[in-house]
């Protein structure tokens, strides 16, 4: 009997110890999705950069761009694995410092960064260009998850929108709103949007939307969230009227989008077609099964088939069937995040997972909707697939954080600080 009890105790301890020594831990389905997207990235970049390879100004082969993408993936995968091994408690502690560093780096781009197409987004680092706004998107979600988690015991009683009359801000009630709601919860989100907006309007919108949904899930009062939407709409209208940031570029893209829906395009010369129209031609050419790997025709006509229109290029070569599978992979990331969230039981890891999954999935959906002309052009890349270093690296880090939470769910190693559970009423 004693021997049987010892064996039973050993069996009970085996799963936890084995989990601790696994090199790749966390949600297995999510790992499979990441592996599939990584393979697709190599195929897409290698084939879509043919135009760049034959460009007289670059004088580089497709193998050069393939090696460049492989280097980015070689950097990203270890970062992903490392992020998946870090305890959420450390992410919680580093949220404030990481956010401040990302804000400063993003601001520095406007003074020392490289400018392309009228937008300052990158800091040159040798052969690569670092885009701090990609890091800031992740840091904003991280900080907001921390701020919401630490206030779950009273979140449904807090107000985050102060009075619009500045003369009332000195009143005790308004000071309380600023101190307990506006500064810790709302201000970091607005600051991130303001800092990102001048160079990349759609990224600012993406950060705002993901943060708004996080606040909704984090039980911020609905009345406050509706006020925030109204103020955001008014701010966007004002920015357009004053031509702030890249409002002129955004306005031109909206006008082009409306024109494509309202005016006949049959008489337009081929050379005057927009990239969105070319992407729709590519999707039409692809049909059900596609033209075959390396057989795209429209790629030589597009400006950025390897980044802004990677999905249309993928449809042309691999067909609608595999394109739907690719779309499902991105949606699956969010569904897996919901499952991980349900198993958390505490606010910080749960909100972190959903916020990061929202960033990745919504960015993919924005990219795809542009290619079929459902929305105006945004310049959003296809996460993990489009050519681009900063986006790929920080998408990998975000996925690593999600895997970290799922790993701790399996190990049951999450902390449960008082007042942090999201189900407390």
Image (cartoon, rainbow, N blue to C red):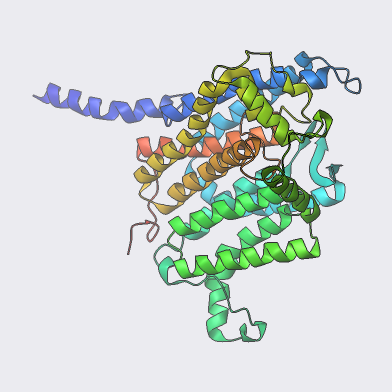
Q: Is 302 in front, or is 48?
A: 302
Seen in the image, is 369 located left or right of residue 345?
A: right
Is residue 220 depicted above or below 141 in this figure?
Answer: below
Q: Is 370 in front, or is 48?
A: 370
Q: Quarter holding the C terminus?
A: bottom left
Is residue 113 depicted above or below 304 in this figure?
Answer: below
Residue 409 in percent (x, y) is at 37, 39
Q: Which residue lies furthest to the right in this view?
A: 57
Residue 392 in percent (x, y) is at 65, 32
Q: Is 115 in front, or is 49?
A: 49
Residue drawn where x is 68% and y is 48% of the image = 202
Residue drawn where x is 42% and y is 25% of the image = 21
Residue 173 in percent (x, y) is at 52, 83
Is residue 280 depicted above or below 369 in this figure?
Answer: above
Residue 63 in sight here: yes
Total labels: the figure holds: 0
In which image quadrant can residue 193 be found?
Answer: bottom right
Residue drawn where x is 72% and y is 54% of the image = 197
Q: Is 214 in front, or is 272?
A: 272
Seen in the image, is 7 located left or right of residue 211?
A: left
Q: Quarter holding the N terminus?
A: top left
Seen in the image, is 20 located left or right of residue 301?
A: left
Residue 102 in percent (x, y) is at 69, 49
Residue 127 in sight here: no
């Amino acid at each position: 009997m004693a021997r049987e009890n010892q064996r039973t105790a050993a069996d009970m301890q085996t799963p936890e110890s084995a989990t601790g020594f696994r090199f790749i831990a966390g949600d297995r389905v999510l790992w499979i999705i990441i592996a599939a997207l990584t393979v697709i990235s190599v195929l897409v970049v290698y084939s879509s950069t043919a135009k760049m390879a034959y460009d007289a100004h670059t004088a580089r082969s497709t193998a050069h761009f393939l090696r460049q993408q492989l280097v980015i993936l070689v950097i990203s995968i270890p970062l992903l694995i490392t992020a998946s091994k870090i305890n959420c408690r450390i992410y919680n502690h580093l949220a404030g410092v990481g956010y401040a560093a990302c804000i400063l780096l993003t601001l520095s781009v406007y003074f020392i960064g490289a400018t392309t197409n009228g937008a300052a987004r990158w800091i040159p680092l040798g052969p690569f260009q670092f885009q701090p706004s990609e890091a800031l998107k992740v840091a904003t979600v991280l900080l907001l998850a921390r701020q919401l988690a630490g206030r779950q015991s009273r979140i449904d009683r807090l107000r985050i929108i102060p009075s619009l009359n500045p003369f009332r801000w000195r009143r005790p009630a308004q000071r309380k709103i600023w101190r307990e709601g506006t500064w810790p919860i709302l201000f970091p989100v607005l600051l991130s949007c303001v800092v990102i907006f001048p160079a990349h309007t759609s990224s600012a919108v993406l950060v705002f939307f993901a943060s708004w949904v996080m606040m909704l899930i984090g039980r911020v009062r609905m009345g406050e969230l509706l006020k925030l939407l109204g103020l955001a709409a008014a701010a966007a209208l004002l920015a357009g009227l004053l031509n702030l940031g890249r409002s002129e570029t955004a306005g031109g893209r909206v006008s082009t989008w409306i024109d494509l829906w309202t005016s006949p395009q049959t008489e337009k010369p081929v050379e005057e077609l927009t990239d969105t129209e070319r992407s729709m031609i590519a999707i039409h050419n692809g049909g059900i099964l596609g033209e075959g790997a390396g057989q795209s025709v429209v790629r030589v006509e597009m400006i950025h088939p390897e980044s802004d229109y990677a999905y249309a290029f993928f449809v042309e070569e691999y067909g609608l069937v595999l394109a739907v599978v690719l779309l499902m992979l991105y949606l699956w990331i969010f569904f897996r995040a919901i499952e991980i969230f349900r198993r958390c039981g505490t606010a910080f890891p749960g909100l972190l997972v959903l916020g990061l999954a929202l960033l990745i999935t919504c960015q993919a959906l924005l990219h795809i909707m542009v290619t079929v002309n459902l929305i105006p052009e945004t310049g959003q890349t296809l996460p993990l697939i489009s050519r681009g270093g900063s986006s790929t690296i920080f998408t990998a880090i975000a996925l690593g954080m999600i895997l970290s939470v799922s790993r701790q769910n399996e190990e049951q190693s999450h902390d449960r600080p008082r007042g942090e559970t999201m189900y407390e009423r």
